[in-house]
Image: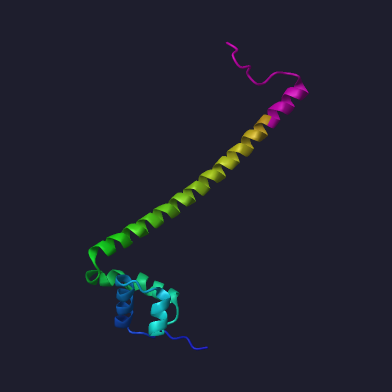
Amino acid sequence: MKHYVNRYPDEFKIRIVKEYMTTDVSRKELANKYGFGDGGTLNKWIRIFGGGISEKIEPQVLRAMSEERKTSKKADDQQARIKQLEQALAQEQLKTEALNTMIDIAEEQFNISIRKKAGSKR
């Protein structure tokens, strides 16, 4: 199986990316029309050449793309933070359960009241 490195010229790739960004044609339709693989190839080209054709794309399209990237990254960061906090909460719940169990065992074995009674004054 041969591997083609840089099989298509950059001008061709930029033209395809521009066509994708300025029309309603899907990635798969473009891939079939020009015969360059699949939608994943176009995604790669968009990442590489998307910024290089900014002067050819309408400003509102660029703003929308930029906002989408920011929103996506922010959502990913928030999801990662939520997962981290959930893990920390689970650890603290286990720790609290262990401490409560330890206090229960100590009160039972030594016949002393370790927990402070609610409403008691010093």
Residue 49 placed where, x, y %?
32, 73
For the point 40% across and 56% down, the residue is 73
Residue 43 placed where, x, y %?
40, 72
The residue lying toward the viewer, choosing from 76 and 64, is 64
Residue 44 placed where, x, y %?
40, 73
Q: Is residue 82 above or below residue 95?
A: below
Q: Is residue 56 above or below residue 76?
A: below
Which residue is situated farthest in the right direction here?
A: 109
The residue lying toward the viewer, choosing from 39 and 70, is 39
Residue 50 placed where, x, y %?
31, 70
- Locate residue 47: give its quadrant: bottom left
- Is residue 82 inside the magenta stretch? no
Q: Is 50 on the left-hand or right-hand side of 95?
A: left
For the point 30% across and 79% down, the residue is 15
The C terminus - image quarter: top right
- Is residue 113 inside the magenta stretch? yes
For the point 40% across and 53% down, the residue is 74
Question: Colour mode?
Answer: rainbow
Which residue is situated farthest in the left direction here?
A: 55
Q: Is 12 on the left-hand or right-hand side of 99?
A: left
Q: Which residues are magenta?
A: 101-122
- Locate residue 36: give its quadrant: bottom left
Which residue is situated farthest in the top direction here?
A: 122
Quick check: can you spot residue 99? Answer: yes
